Image (cartoon, coloured by chain):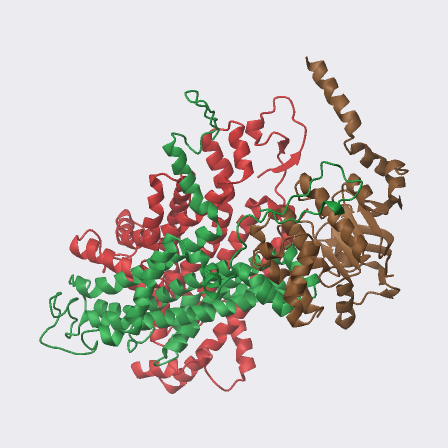
Amino acid sequence: MSAVAPQLPTPGFDAIEAGTTATGAVKARARIPWRFLGNRALFYLFTLWAAITINFFLPRLMKGDAVTAYLARNRNVTPEAADALRALLGLDTDASLWQQYIDYWAHLLRGDLGISLLHGMRPVTEVVGQSLIWTVALVGFATLIAFAVGTIGGAIVGWRRGSRLDVLIPITTFFSTIPYFWLGLLAISVFSVALGWFPIGKAYGVGVAPEWSWEFIGDVLHHGFLPAATIVIASLGGWMLGMRNMMLTVLDEDYVTVAQAKGMPNDRVLWRYAARNAVLPQIQSFALALGFIVGGTIVMEVVFSYPGVGKLLLDATNAKDYALMQGVFLVITISVLLANLLADVAYAFLDPRTRQTEA
Amino acid sequence: MNTIVNDTTQRPANAPATATVRNAAPAGKAPKKPTFWSKLGAAFAMFRNRKSITGLSILGFFVLVAIFADVLAPYSPTKVDNTARFQPPSAEHWLGTTHIGEDVLSQVIHGTRGVIVVGFLAAIIATVIAIVVGVLSGYLRGWRSEGLSALTNVFLVIPGIPLIIIVASMFEDPPLILIAAVLGLIGWAWGARVLRAQTMSLRSRDFVQAARANGEPLRRIITVEMLPNLMALIAASFVGTVTAAIIGLTTLSYIGIIPVTTYNWGTILNWASAQGAFRQGQWWWFMPPGLCIAAIGVALSLINFGIDEYVNPRLRSAGERARAMKKKGMNVNDTVTVVRTNTNTQENP
Amino acid sequence: MTVLEFDAVTKVYSVRGAGQMKALDDVSFTLRSGQTVGLVGQSGSGKSTIAKILTQLESPTSGEVRLDGEPIPRRGKGLRAYRQQLRMVFQDPFASLNPYHTIRYAIQRPLELDKVVPKDKLDDEVRRLLGRVRLDGDAVIDRRPHELSGGQRQRVAIARALASRPKLLVADEPVSMLDVSIRLGVLNLLADLQREHGLGVLYITHDLATARHFSDEILVLNQGRVVERGPADDVILHPQNPYTQELRAASPDPDTYFAHAAGILGGEK
């Protein structure tokens, strides 16, 4: 990124190349807006603390005791083991609430999220980690494609306003307003059941062991196609509409008219002037959307029986596996905060105005 | 319109002769005193265009169905009829039957009520909170404003659906009001953020400064001076929240978080899915509820499009202008001025 | 007679990351009722800051503003009484009226807030004020701002300022955003109103010509400091300070203008 400073044109200076007639482009180091980022980081830390505290209180507000439910299913656990289990889950009521809170933080900072009753006593971190990979890979990929296609499409539809392309907006918006789970179920009904092109659910075939082979990867892609496709179709409308509206506003601005009047070729005006400015709010939306990736995939995973984080949360809630529940909620919240922070960093670099407020 | 009264005797002696004072010429009658209805019409100007009206009509249709559900539904939704299971649509059952012979049409009609009630209730709760927090944090300065803004951001960032799942599992049979309240609490943050930004921009406008200089008390500045200017934004936020609440409700019902004792289109789909309707191609059971959700979603989107075009006239006119120019044979993106020499006048697009 | 004293006022703003910015530096002047003081300066000279301090939208970093010898109060009844005495006409006729309210409401509100006339006389008073600014009450009173022209809006703003019967008026570039052809009409209106009501007017502008036409005394402001002051004709016709001289040189002079233009055209041929 270069900073633009007023400067007399030097010989061999191409006004169109540099972008304006009155200034020369100076390649300066991008200034990092420390204050802005510092503020945001502080805010995220605060939110993290709030989320962790909420997380701490959640199971204590719920009815039923996880350990008792577990014991009911597994009779061959000694009373001492049951006590140890309770202590591990932080459910022993001997210590005061404050002491439990401190212990909770101590566990967290050691990376210990407890053990999952539902998944054979394996550490929560391991269980969640596995599911997280599936969720992030599929949904992250699909969201990225939807964002890219939607934004580029929106820029073109905005540029060619009044043409037949305008019909794309109501079509894609319609697909956004259909409830996603219904879209997914329909897709399964048509493509999996009726046409048999794709499997009905899951990330890979039953009985297939995960391994790094082309066969496995192919199987994963085959299973992942429908979920990814439905996510893209459902979210495309939002991106396209947002970008197109911003384009229409930007195209009305004077600097676009000046660029055209200077004789700049159309596609340069479209991409380097108009789209470049219109995309800034889109990036902010993308950041927030990233936050919703991890939190909002529950629906997709239920419909497609996909072994991701959302399904994990549901199962944990139904089985009252508190440790797992807390762990999943925590991971989801942290991912959301991280995604938002990343997007703030990206936005700070792309928008020269945030850079300038530091000057 | 000339309304300046002519009073040449008062023109100062050293004013140049070219300084004219216009004559009093009342052009046309004085405007009619605004009646209640015309004021109401003006307040709802943002809904006057075609898109909004279409959306409002569809929405109105569903509201009526919800109100008159008992009268409209041919059967009781829970009436079991074991002789007529899994039946495709027929004269007796327009939308067929479920796995235990319940009439699908009656279920869909009764399901409308839950959707409309929760959707609007949640949106009202969310919008009221958004207005209070958003406008206050936009108008106030200093730590009060920053604090409210931080609160808004926290609610914005904490993932909603996981929170609802956890909260909902705490209750055996949550009443509709509770569900609406929780949905509202999850959803107010977005509107608050937008309102805060707009209020901050409004605050520095001259007419607000003038009101402050006149000694107008704070509560009147917010309610009487600023709120009317925020109306379009509030309306759009409200409509968006209704959509989100309805989708949230039906999705959570489908997943089974919200217990199936309540009636809404999502729970119908839950039963349908559980009974394998999707795999057995019993389209009459799972298509109508989904289509209804989609229809309401489309209606609400149309209303929002209408509001968008009212607020930002460029969105409406940009396409129209381009089409009008195309008819004349010109491309709106052309950089070259078109000059016609076959007529007497030159045209500059 | 009402006297407003602006005494050695300094206003410093702190800008995030860039240190401090001195908007006003030791500015003093006196405004008396029945008198017009012109405040001349470019954008950024501090003119608007003075207006904001006078209307209590900002407060001085150091120095004092006194009304009739008493420092102006920051809150309470005293502040209300002060606000009733000093009103402002804003620069932008498009932004100073709330687009959602009728003209009637805009003028009626200050009447109600300051309890100028009893309730049953409100309508009459609004029409009287509109007549004072030479607008046809019947035609205008139930319209909204976007239905009026810029000049009409500014007249409404003046009527609104006069509603509470103040003794002092701050006019912050009242005609800069109006068509040139109607500027004189609005300025003459202000001059007439000043004479009729014995107002003290602070006329803030960047335009030397109208400042001279309209003011008794002129202050020239440059980067927050008063660089010259004196009777209007003296300052304009015999400027002492180099900045004032530059300002004056920059104003178009009809006599030399046409000669210059003729010279150019003659040369081109």
**Occupied quadrant, residue A81:** bottom left
Viewer-closest of B175 and C243: C243
Viewer-closest of C111 and C25: C111
Residue A220 falls left or right of residue A101: left
Q: Position of residue C257 (x, y in %)?
A: 76, 26
Q: Is residue A123 visible?
A: no
Viewer-closest of C252 and A146: C252
Q: Identify the residue at image location x=10%, y=73%.
A: B84
**Occupied quadrant, residue A329:** bottom left
Residue A21 falls left or right of residue B251: right
Q: Identify the residue at image location x=83%, y=55%.
A: C10
Q: Colour of chain B?
A: green
- How many numbered marks have been drawn onto this rendered protein structure? 0
Q: Quick one: which residue is furthest to the front in this view?
A: B9
Q: Colour of chain A?
A: red
Q: Position of residue B49 (x, y in %)?
A: 40, 53
Q: Identify the residue at image location x=32%, y=59%.
A: A180
Q: Is residue C35 visible?
A: yes
Q: Is residue C17 above or below residue A301?
A: above
Q: Position of residue B318 (x, y in %)?
A: 44, 42
Viewer-closest of A50 and B171: B171
Q: Quick one: which residue is furthest to the top in this view?
A: C269
Residue C227 falls left or right of residue A221: right
Give me the chain that's brown: C
Q: Position of residue B34 (x, y in %)?
A: 51, 61
